[in-house]
Image (cartoon, rainbow, N blue to C red):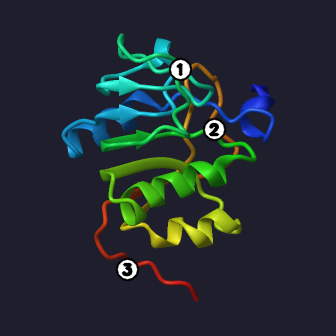
Amino acid sequence: MTFNTGLFTSLSGEGITPSDLFDALWGEFDGFDLDPCGQREHHYTAHRIATAGGNFYDGSIPAMDGLTQPWHGKVYVNPPYGRGIGEWVYKCWSSVCLLNDCELVVALLPSRTDTKWWHNWVMEASEIRFIKGRLRFGEHNNTAPFANMVVIFNGLANTNKEV
């Protein structure tokens, strides 16, 4: 099996959302206002796009880091899957549930149910959708070696239970 091992470790976690998945989410939620983890060359149609490393691409805003800037409206997030993912998941949760800055945050995340960020923040989400099978990110020939989930934070009560 050959693939970019850096994509699937804590060395680098950036992967382009599969277009069929993004298009389905875009249609379901009637678009997104911000993609704070976007990559310009693979930007779909969010009104504003930022990179995890620090660039906003809307033509009028100087370079910014999508994690440290406030989020507003409807946000789509496919964060880097490395060691810092917990910060991104906290931002997803807090932008809706704590600060009430966002109407909605839809996050594509690895299904890592044994992590602190899972138990602290994902379990507080309004909805968790586990994806059957494994996703193929961007131009990679092979699927990811892990399962994914779509996590929805919208301020509604969750029905997620821990046993």
Q: Is residue 62 above or below residue 112?
A: above
Residue 131 is at least partly visible in this image = no
For the C terminus, give its image quadrant: bottom right
Which image quadrant is residue 154 in? Answer: bottom left
- Identify the amino acid type marked 2: Pro
Residue 112 is at least partly visible in this image = yes
Q: Looking at the rendered structure, which numbered label has been put on residue 80?
A: 2
Q: CA distance from mark 2 to mark 3?
A: 27 Å
Which type of secondary structure does the marked residue at label 1 adopt?
A: loop
- Residue at the location (55% across, 54% down)? 89
Q: Position of residue 22 (x, y in %)?
A: 37, 35
* Crowdedness near tag 3: few (<14), some (14–19) or many (≥20) residues, C-alpha within 10 Å: few
Which type of secondary structure does the marked residue at label 3 adopt?
A: loop
Answer left or right for 25 relative to 142. left
- Identify the amino acid type marked 3: Thr
Q: Is residue 34 above or below residue 84?
A: above
Q: Which residue is mark 3?
A: 159
Q: Across the whole image, how many numbered discs are drawn on residues?
A: 3
CB-based contact (under 8 Å), mark 2 and mark 3: no
Of mark 1 and mark 3, the one earlier in the sequence is 1
Q: Position of residue 102 (x, y in %)?
A: 32, 51
In the foreground, 45 or 96: 96
Q: Position of residue 114 (x, y in %)?
A: 70, 69
- Identify the amino acid type marked 1: Asn
Q: Position of residue 127 (x, y in %)?
A: 37, 66
- Residue at the location (22% across, 45% down)? 28
- Residue at the location (39% across, 59% down)? 99
Q: Nearer the viewer, mark 1 or mark 3?
A: 1
Q: Is residue 124 above or below residue 91?
A: below
In the foreground, 27 or 106: 106
- Residue at the location (52% across, 18% down)? 63
